[in-house]
Image (cartoon, rainbow, N blue to C red):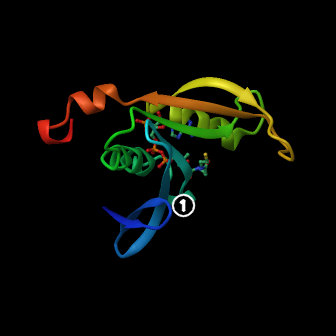
Amino acid sequence: MSIMLWDSFLQNLAAKIDGNYIGLLSLDFPYPNNSNIYWMAVFRNYQCQGVGCKLVEAAYSLVITARTMTVETLSPNVSDENYLKTYKFYESCGFEPLFNLKPQDYKWNMVYMMKNLNQIHQNRPEKYS
Ligand SMILES: CC(C)(COP(=O)(O)OP(=O)(O)OC[C@H]1O[C@@H](n2cnc3c(N)ncnc32)[C@H](O)[C@@H]1OP(=O)(O)O)[C@@H](O)C(=O)NCCC(=O)NCCS
């Protein structure tokens, strides 16, 4: 599997296998100290095979100054099995829940999660730290 990068107003990573795109992660930088997973998905047939994990790890390498990575997803108190899986996925990547919120016009309660990237910065070669 290969991971490709291209720029737009977001930084986008695509996972490709045998010539087919199977996953995407879009990262934005709303403030210099934070990176945010704007959108992410892996094709159903390729889920639970480590592709999402690899995309998140590749996203860390795009972060130069930010000390945190955040994501908005459906709150675990919403009983939707698919999104509970998503919450568990981010938890397994080391993201921790901060708070729940139901933005105006949203149907569901959302949870905002954060991962501290200090450890990742510390483990980098000196030129990146
Ligand atoms: C969420 C999503 C991106 C995860 O990608 P993935 O490739 O399936 O995830 P991985 O295979 O890398 O999983 C990594 C870890 O997450 C956890 N995890 C993944 N799927 C899980 C599930 N169904 N239940 C519990 N834990 C799960 C596991 O700890 C797993 O590690 P393990 O395989 O060693 O046990 C993918 O399931 C998806 O596209 N879902 C639908 C769209 C979506 O929810 N997008 C995010 C919106 S914010």
Q: Position of residue 27 (x, y in %)?
A: 48, 52
Question: In the drawing, does residue 69 fall left or right of residue 19?
Answer: right
Indicate yes or no: mark 1 CB to ligand 1 under 8 Å.
yes
Where 82 falls versus 99 (above or below)? below
**Looking at the picture, does residue 28 appear above or below residue 68?**
below
Q: Is residue 119 above or below residue 30?
A: above
Residue nearest the viewer, comparing 113 with 67: 67
- Number of marks drawn: 1
Q: Is residue 66 left or right of residue 76?
A: left
- Which residue does the image show at 72% across and 27% down from the upper left? 100
**Residue at the image position 29 percent from the left and 32 percent from the top:** 120
Given residues 48 and 118, the one toward you in this image is 118
Residue highlighted by disc 1: 43
Left or right: residue 64 versus residue 90 is: left
Q: Going 53% across and 37% down the picture, which residue do you hit?
A: 70
Residue 97 at x, y = what percent? 59, 24
Question: Residue most toward the bottom?
Answer: 19
Residue nearest the observer in this picture, 59 or 63: 63
Compared to 81, does 46 lie above or below? below
